[in-house]
Amino acid sequence: MAAPMDQRINVPIDDPNADNRMERYLESKGNNPEKPPSPTPLIEEAILEGRRLAHENRLEGKDLDELDALEDEEDDAFLEQYKKQRMARVIVYNEEGKHGTVYPLSKPDYQKRGHRC
């Protein structure tokens, strides 16, 4: 029994915007219109601009208590970030010097030094 013509079959597609050989061939022959540029850079730029404006206007309309609390929050965030950076440096420093210095040891040296310990 054949499938009806109006029935759609869903085929999973990894990336619907992916370019393939057939599309490139059709574009080279002029049969397939070129894809419009991606709006992603414009969206990212708008998000960054919004964050910048929000950061600039964060002090507008706040009284002294709110400004003091905001200053404390920013100080805490900075100190927390500095603490994480410092701890990462300390961990790297400790891992580098874990074994101290390693010297080659020959059999006569081992007999002299190893038995004396």
Image: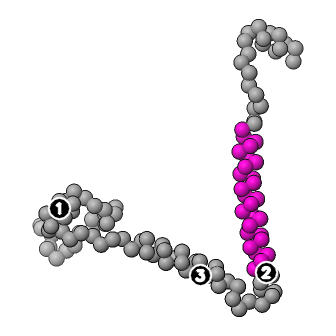
Mark number, residue 53? 3
What x and y, as percent, mark residue 31? Answer: 14, 68
Please identify, in this view, whether the residue under mark 1 or under mark 2 is nearer the observer: 1
How far apart are the alpha carbons under marks 1 and 2? Answer: 61 Å
Q: Residues within 10 Å of mark 2 (few under 14, many from 20)?
A: few
Vertical side of 61 occupied by 17: above or below? above
Q: Determine which residue is flagged by label 1.
A: 28
What x and y, as percent, mark residue 100? Answer: 77, 31
Name the residue: 19% across, 74% down: 7
Residue span colored magenta: 70-96
How far apart are the alpha carbons under marks 1 and 3? Answer: 44 Å
Vertical side of 31 occupied by 90: above or below? above
Amino acid of disc 2: Ala
Amino acid of disc 3: Leu
The furthest residue to the right: 116
Amino acid of disc 1: Ser
Q: Determine which residue is flagged by label 2.
A: 69
- Figure quadrant of residue 55: bottom right
